[in-house]
Amino acid sequence: MSEQDEQFPAQQQQPPGLTDPMTPTPDHGESSYEGHGLLTGRRALITGGDSGIGRAVAIAYAREGADVAIVYLPEEQADADETSRWVEEAGRRCVQIPTDLTDEQAARGAVRTAVSGLGGLDILVNNAGFQMARRESVADITSEDLDRTFKTNLYALFWVTQTALEHLGEGSVILNNSSIQAYQPSETLLDYASTKAAINNVTVNLASELGSRGIRVNAVAPGPIWTPLQPATQFTEKVEKFGSDAPLGRAGQPAEVAPAFVFLAADSTASYVSGTVLGVTGGKPVF
Ligand code: NAD
Ligand code: MG
């Protein structure tokens, strides 16, 4: 690897990963995001809202005038507290829901907790996700591996969406977090990449079903973004050159992804946008 390719110091964590040990600290828009009242009075549930892209979306939504609820794993409480602090600093409410979404009843219960805590629901952001890079071949992926990846990324998306739809009315919005992996799958992320391709498919199909209810459904497909997911699930050498293969030559920050989630959530900017996947990839192709 040339020195030029090195983007980040070597570092490793265990999943789900935390923000504090990361070097450098990710940028979630804390000192840069300016709200313009685009989501005033809206109520948003963001799964995985404790850290990374989810935290940046929570901060942006709060500064746009929305109250938020965040779902995360209990071991991520420190990150959840930090997100809540920023949301509350913006003058909005943050409902904390520590829940393992791979459990169906818990996932459905998390949505009900969000609805009662926020007094309703207008925006669902299915952002929680799990991946694990593997050197082995397809033959070595265990059912346990598949369960964690598919239940977190797909089953939970279905369970959470089904339960949310009992509460989402006309004008509501569902946003899914896809990935560049849906278009350019890495051999090391065979199972994860397949869930992201499925999420794109679900996004388009669900937009078709829910259009008549006045509910818009879209996805964002991020490229390489500097979040705890990376040091927690990627090989050290991949972390060191993370993002260097993007046409823009670097990894993106969570703060650079959040505006796409604002654009797609707000009626004033995206009232006729549904069934699409918006790439935020640093130039990697999403087709
Ligand atoms: P992140 O680790 O900050 O966020 C992922 C979150 O998922 C965690 O914070 C955790 O709270 C949640 N989660 C995982 N398993 C869970 C479970 N069983 N129950 C409840 N919550 C659970 O990393 P991120 O990169 O911000 O990830 C957010 C989304 O972005 C994911 O869907 C990921 O696939 C997607 N994405 C990330 C990148 C990237 O380069 N970082 C690229 C493309 C897509
Ligand atoms: Mg986290």
Image: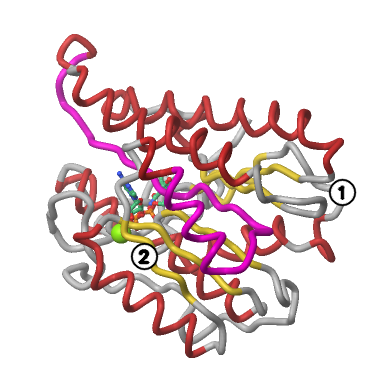
Query: In front of the other: label 2 or label 1?
Result: 2
Residue bearing the label numbered 1: 272
Q: Determine the residue positioned at 73% across, 77% down.
A: 40
Residue bearing the label numbered 2: 50
Q: Label 2: how many residues lie within 10 Å, few (<14), some (14-19) or many (20+)?
A: many
Q: How is the image coloured?
A: secondary structure
Q: Label 1: how many residues lie within 10 Å, few (<14), some (14-19) or many (20+)?
A: few
Residue 115 shown left or right of residue 214 in the figure: left
Q: Is residue 22 above or below residue 172?
A: below
Q: Determine the residue positioned at 27% across, 51% down.
A: 230
Q: Is residue 68 above or below residue 252?
A: below
Q: Determine the residue positioned at 45% across, 71% down.
A: 95
Residue 170 shown left or right of residue 101 in the figure: right
The answer to whether mark 2 is within 8 Å of ligand 2 is yes
The answer to which quarter of the image holds residue 37 is bottom right
The answer to which quarter of the image holds residue 64 is bottom right
Does residue 115 belong to the magenta stretch?
Answer: yes
Q: How many marks?
A: 2
Which stretch appears magenta? 108-137
The amino acid pointed to by label 2 is Asp
Q: Position of residue 39 (x, y in %)?
A: 71, 72
The amino acid pointed to by label 1 is Tyr
Q: Determine the residue positioned at 13% across, 58% down.
A: 11
